[in-house]
Image (spheres, rainbow, N blue to C red):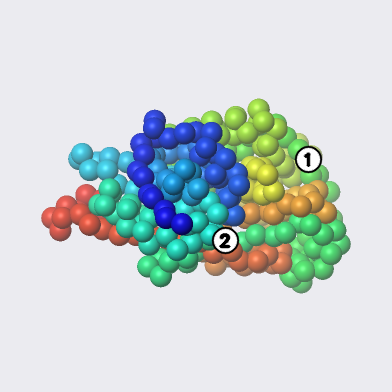
Amino acid sequence: MTFSIQYLERNNTDTAKWDDCIRSADNELIYGYSWYLDRMAENWSALVINNYDAVMPLTWKRKYGIRYLYQPPFCQQLGIFGKRAVYGKMIPDLLSAARKRFPFAEIFLNHDNNHPDTILKNNFILALNKSYDRLHENFKHDLKYNISRAAKEALHYTSSADYTAVISRYRKEYGQRFPHVKNDDYKKLHHVCRYLDSEENLIVREVRKEEASLAASLLLKMNKRLYLIVSVTTAKGRQLRANHFLISEIIKEFSNQDLILDFEGSDLPGVAHFYKDFGCANQPYSFFRYNRLPFFIKWLKG
């Protein structure tokens, strides 16, 4: 079978075929859908194999007239999506085709895009298709201890509809840690949440004590995956181990279902340790960078 690769601007892509390709892909992820890219990326175009047998979104910006590839915030993994039998041997060809169009790239490929010229990044996932008791057995000892301590604090696990407040709190608590995430990026996340809320695929959960919210999480639901896109804990919540309690209760609520809880990271040692305590598996994805800019152009990193 022969394969052809075509480059398409966004306005020339067939949206229905694109989303069908993502939906049926062996490595389906929410970030690859056209509606997610339209809301989160500044611009995007695409590489398409044959008649949408596999696709690669190319998210780009422009500076001084030069287009370059970047990774939109709240869009952990992109890369090549489709049937592994189609794209598996074509990853070098697709990356080469991207290089010809864009002289610079700092992007993240997805967990199924194995390529030697990449750096692996952590992403922890937990299959929820067992009872909570079975899942709890795999929690690490220190996590079980912290959950039991939190349970003595009269904490209340509840659902919420106020995703706007959670995003605002997240930005207030952690925004300075992520200076590359701009005001416009948070607005884009609001657009994604509004859309998923209308589709009943947005999950907002909180831990409260009396009237105070101590911890909250936003989860995006798409088919068989829950994405922990935002999680925030107040200083008081950290003292009371509210986040340990919150994640444990989320796992309890969605246990015994054919779902994967995607923790969306992390390479930060403390966060990675926290996630691994839940008995997660690491499903790493790849950082891919190249620079074909003339040597005298330093604007991207300057």
Name the residue: 76% across, 67% down.
Answer: 139
Residue at horizontal 80%, vertical 63%? 135
Name above or below for residue 196 compared with residue 157.
Answer: above
Report which residue position mark 2 lands on.
123
Residue 4 % position (x, y): 38, 50
Instruction: Identify which residue, 151 or 259, lies in the foreground.
Output: 259
The spot of residue 71 in percent (x, y) is 41, 48
Nearer to us in this view, 41 or 98? 98
Dot 2 or dot 1: first in sequence order is 2
Q: Residue under circle 1?
A: 158
Relative image position of residue 275 (x, y in whole percent): 65, 62
Instruction: Using the numbered discs, state the Cα–Cα distance from disc 2 to disc 1 in whole angstroms.
Output: 26 Å
Label 1 CA crowd tier, 10 Å (few <14, some 14–19, many 20+): some
Question: Which residue does the image show at 68% across and 65% down from the upper left?
Answer: 280
Residue 134 visible in rendering: yes
In the image, what residue type sits under mark 2? Answer: Asn
Q: Camera-side residue: 290 or 156?
A: 290
x and y, in percent, of residue 101 in the image: 27, 48
User: Which disc, if any, is residue 15?
Assistant: none
- The number of numbered badges drawn on the structure is 2
Left or right relative to 292: residue 155: right
The answer to whether 123 appears left or right of 185 in the picture is right
| Residue at x 67% of width, y 31% of height | 199
Q: Quadrant of residue 6?
A: top left
